[in-house]
């Protein structure tokens, strides 16, 4: 028969190990303290109160916040990849242009051995680019997102965040091989998040975190015409994301978490295929892309508990990043005028056999 402990979420299990270590350290301390009392309250809690106490010790919402940050970068890179590809394959003479995309995404964060979290991401991207040569365009893009995560069904709390990112991008069409293109983006983002949760002692805390991210995406593709109206485009890419998670202190003098700055990263290879069909002013497209990560990022946090006199740090498992993500999407463009196009796209992502995100984007491009 399987042990009951095998069904305990990994973050709760690591928080339980920290709890046991703190109890052992206090066993020979004769003086009473608020910290010792808080540990005893958990130890002798009724069964119904234990899930909330363990979740309070684990603070899993913080790894969820980091997970959403990486998720935002993936969604932004996916949408920007679609946009830059459409610019790279524009017909006619190279010209300057502006574009805008509104993006709405809803999903879940899963990881085996952890509680699931519901997520929402709402935002927009705006860009402007200019031809440097007949075959090279350079541009800048500004994006802003709001995000939400909800673990309240599992006593984990909630999080609301705002992200502002600035990116530079480039598009190059190889003149000696028509249809071959390269595109890339390099960006930096600031992520501000407000947490609302309950600690292991039952205190409600509302800490704020500030994270800084660096992300890069590169793609090489080749458009192959199948007929006058149709073409397919296989492509290869690479995506790299780096995040410095800012430290914070929860205002609970007994079991509040004290976390220092931390670094996280994930780099993935990308393999994809796009298909297009053009009918007069309409252009329809379908695309699929698979991201395979080269590293396993668990998003663990190193924390100590505010009232612990030993000031020992403990490692708490987090909801890690998936190593395999598949994006599947459909889209349509309509040329209102020769230099003005509106577009609508729908994308969904699959991780470990589960649908994790559904994103809709609506935008336009205007060429000068």
Image (spheres, rainbow, N blue to C red):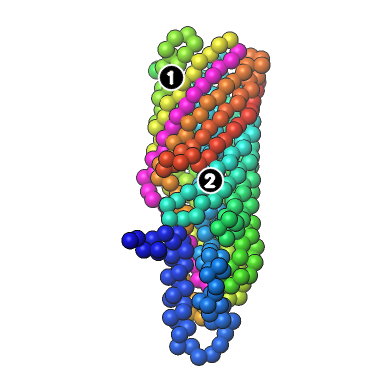
Question: Sequence order check: which comes first, mark 1 or mark 2?
Answer: 2
Taking 178 as reference, is 212 left or right? right
**Which of label 1 and label 2 is nearer to you?**
2
Structural crowding at the residue carrying mark 1, measured as other residues with C-alpha within 10 Å and reported as few (<14), some (14–19) or many (≥20): some
Q: What kind of secondary structure does the magenta stretch mostly adopt?
A: strand
The location of residue 131, given as percent across then percent down, is 56, 24
Q: Position of residue 309 (x, y in %)?
A: 51, 81
**Residue in the foreground of this view, choosing between 21 and 212:** 21
Q: Are marks 1 and 2 in contact (CB under 8 Å)?
A: no
Give the residue drawn at x 41%, y 17%: 224
Is residue 148 something that shows in the picture? yes
Q: Eyeballing the image, is 171 above or below 75?
A: above
Q: Secondary structure at mark 1?
A: strand
> In which quadrant of the rendered image does the N terminus lie?
bottom left
Disc 1 target residue: 232
Range covered by the magenta-colored residues: 281-305
Q: How many marks?
A: 2
């Amino acid at each position: 028969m399987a042990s009951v402990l095998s069904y305990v979420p990994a973050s709760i299990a690591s928080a339980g190990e920290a709890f046991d270590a703190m109890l052992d350290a206090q066993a020979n301390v004769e003086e009473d303290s608020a910290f010792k009392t808080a540990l005893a309250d958990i130890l002798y809690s009724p069964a119904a109160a234990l899930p909330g106490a363990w979740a309070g010790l684990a603070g899993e919402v913080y790894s969820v916040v980091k997970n959403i940050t990486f998720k935002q970068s993936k969604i932004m890179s996916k949408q920007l990849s679609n946009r830059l590809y459409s610019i790279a394959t524009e017909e006619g003479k190279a010209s300057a242009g502006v574009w805008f995309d509104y993006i709405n995404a809803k999903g879940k964060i899963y990881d085996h051995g952890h509680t699931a979290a519901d997520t929402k991401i709402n935002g927009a991207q705006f860009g402007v680019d200019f031809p440097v040569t007949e075959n090279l365009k350079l541009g800048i893009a500004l994006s802003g997102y709001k995000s939400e995560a909800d673990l309240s069904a599992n006593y984990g709390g909630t999080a609301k965040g705002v992200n502002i990112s600035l990116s530079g991008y480039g598009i190059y069409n190889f003149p000696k091989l028509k249809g071959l293109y390269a595109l890339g983006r390099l960006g930096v983002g600031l992520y501000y998040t407000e947490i609302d949760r309950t600690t292991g002692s039952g205190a409600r805390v509302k800490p704020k975190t500030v994270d800084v991210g660096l992300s890069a995406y590169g793609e090489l593709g080749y458009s192959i015409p199948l007929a006058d109206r149709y073409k397919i485009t296989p492509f290869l890419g690479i995506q790299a994301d780096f995040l410095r998670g800012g430290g914070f202190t929860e205002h609970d003098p007994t079991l509040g978490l004290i976390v220092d700055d931390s670094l996280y990263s994930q780099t993935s290879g990308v393999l994809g295929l796009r298909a297009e069909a053009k009918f007069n002013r309409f252009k329809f497209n379908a695309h699929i892309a698979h991201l395979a990560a080269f590293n396993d990022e668990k998003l663990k946090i190193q924390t100590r508990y505010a009232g612990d006199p030993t000031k020992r740090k403990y490692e708490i498992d987090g909801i890690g990043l998936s190593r395999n993500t598949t994006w599947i999407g459909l889209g349509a463009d309509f040329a209102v005028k020769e230099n003005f196009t509106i577009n609508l796209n729908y994308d969904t992502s699959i991780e470990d056999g589960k649908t994790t995100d559904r994103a809709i984007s609506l935008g336009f491009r205007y060429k000068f």
